[in-house]
Amino acid sequence: MTDRDSGSNWPITAVPAAYLTPGGASFTEFLAKAEPQLLPGGRAYGADQMPHGTTIVALTCADGVVLAGDRRATMGNLIAQRDIEKVFAADSHSAIGIAGTAGLAIEMVRLFKLELEHYEKIEGVRLSLDGKANRLGAMIRGNLGAAMQGLAVVPLFAGFDIDRLPGADAGRIFSYDVTGGRYEEQDYYAIGSGSMFARSALKKRYERGATLPDAVRAAIEALYDAADDDSATGGPDLTRKIYPLVIAVTTTGARRLTDAEVGAVAEEVVAGRMVNPGG
Amino acid sequence: MTMPVYASPEQFMRDRSEYARKGIGRGRSVVVTTYQNGVLFVAENHSPTLHKVSEIYDRIGLAAVGRYNEFENLRTAGIRLADVRGYSYDRRDVTARWLANAYAQTLGSIFSEHQKPYEVELCVAEVARSVGEPVPAPGETRLGAPGQRDQLYRISFDGSIVEETRYIVMGGATEPVASSMEPLFVAGWGLDAALAAAVKSLGAGGEGAPRTLDSGQLEVAVLERTVPERTFRRLERATLDALLSPEATGAEQPGPDGPPGSEAVEQHPADPQPGATASTAEAPEQPEA
């Protein structure tokens, strides 16, 4: 019974002591303490040619917020993947889109989703939207070392703030820089290599209080404009039926639009461009 | 130098078991049962915030009785274990069998190595994606293939582990609850029938039995078979009241083969508005819906 006075008095069992030690509800912090080898970042990287994700757009509408991304990943001048998914539902009422080094970004999204779920399960309540946005900022800051080696991950985070009333700016958008700085954006925003073109397109097309279908249309138009001028952004691929990914976050939750729904809008957009290439 | 008083190992273990059993027996009971579309957890719990039933992972839930701080510690450990495993492998690689084993080993070594055993009893439940074979009838030991049947594991304070296929009663005075549950159980019953039976059985135990429990004294959750990802869902008071009222039609119907016992069960559902008087001194104040 001499082991009772030390911190290692937990029996050696299937559940290691770290798991039984009282602590906070953050999954990332728990991993750093108990299983640091599983955390992204803090590892050595050698290769300089890695797949990169490109344009993500977000805009608010009357029902909430829409987040959309193209499907192309590039590796230098090559197209690494035509149907990559860069937009994800983070939890029931938020969504995240990523630009930057695809491998790191996807791992970061996986960890972020788990961070939100873990908090919800341990605490029994969901994080506030600002809480989620701040956690994401901290995770990007953790990747700063890799970002300095050219492996930056920059997400765009959008969510429906259930603490606000619908119609009262409940749909919110947050952008980040590589140091984890968090900036709330009004109305619309875009990130990635084609973001300049997408943002310009949204500047002309954005309408405050637009309906959800109108906002989806504006997002796909903006992605088309980005693809039009940025070689790293892919446009709607009608031959292969690869369309942008769109997630709508409304009072009922985050919903990924089906390929059929997005496809119908994308075909309309392309048909419009047949007549007027500039939109 | 003083010599410690000699106690035989048998006596030593018996004392610990008795201590733990007494602690668990002081609380209120929990019933976990399988039903047509998943797994149902029903706990008598007068606190709306301090939960006895919790989500662990996509298809895994946990019910616990005994000392709150001890099972809360185990609950947190379970969520961490499951999340780390799902993160490092895949979400499908997190199973109730594995988690139940981890709990059993931990409780077993705490029981034999620590001064004070944990006064807890746990039920780890996993809902199958589809039920390939019917749930075994009472007394039948045949089991479906893993992954094709709901799994209920009961883990005791000493680390002993038992798998059940029908229902589990833990905590408080289990015997009256279990003997009320036994004749009511029908394999593949609907949610309303299962809930009514569990509530009636919980009312059969405790002080002043038989009692009629209302929705404010219950913590109810389900693991829903057909949900693709996170299957755990708490049933709020309004939903409970609707399911417990005699004219409950609900979305959840009993199986197409019509469990024969369900009509009899529905004759005695808990009255939705009995007030605190019916439930004796156990419930001095009720949380508002």
Image (spheres, rainbow, N blue to C red):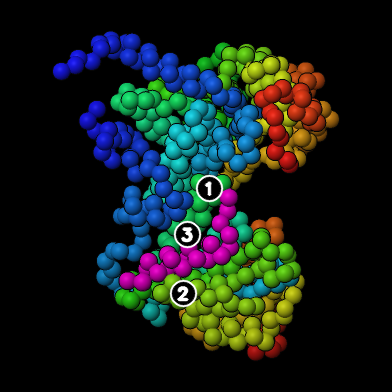
Q: Position of residue A224 (x, y in %)?
A: 60, 80
| Amino acid bearing label 1 | Glu
Tag 3 residue: A112
Q: Main secondary structure of the magenta part?
A: helix
Magenta stretch in the rendered image: A125-145
Determine which residue is flagged by label 1: A123
Q: CA distance from mark 2 to mark 3?
A: 16 Å
Chain-order first, disc 1 or disc 3:
3
Q: Position of residue B152 (x, y in %)?
A: 52, 28
Q: Earlier in the sequence, mark 2 or mark 3?
A: 3
Disc 2 designates what residue? A181
Front-lying residue, B36 or A259: B36
Q: Is residue A131 magenta?
A: yes
Residue B219 on the magenta span? no
Callout 1 and callout 2 share a chain: yes
| Residue A226: x %, y % from top left | 56, 82
Indicate the quadrant where residue A151 lies.
Answer: bottom left
Residue A72 appears in the figure: no
- Where disc 2 sits, the SS reads loop
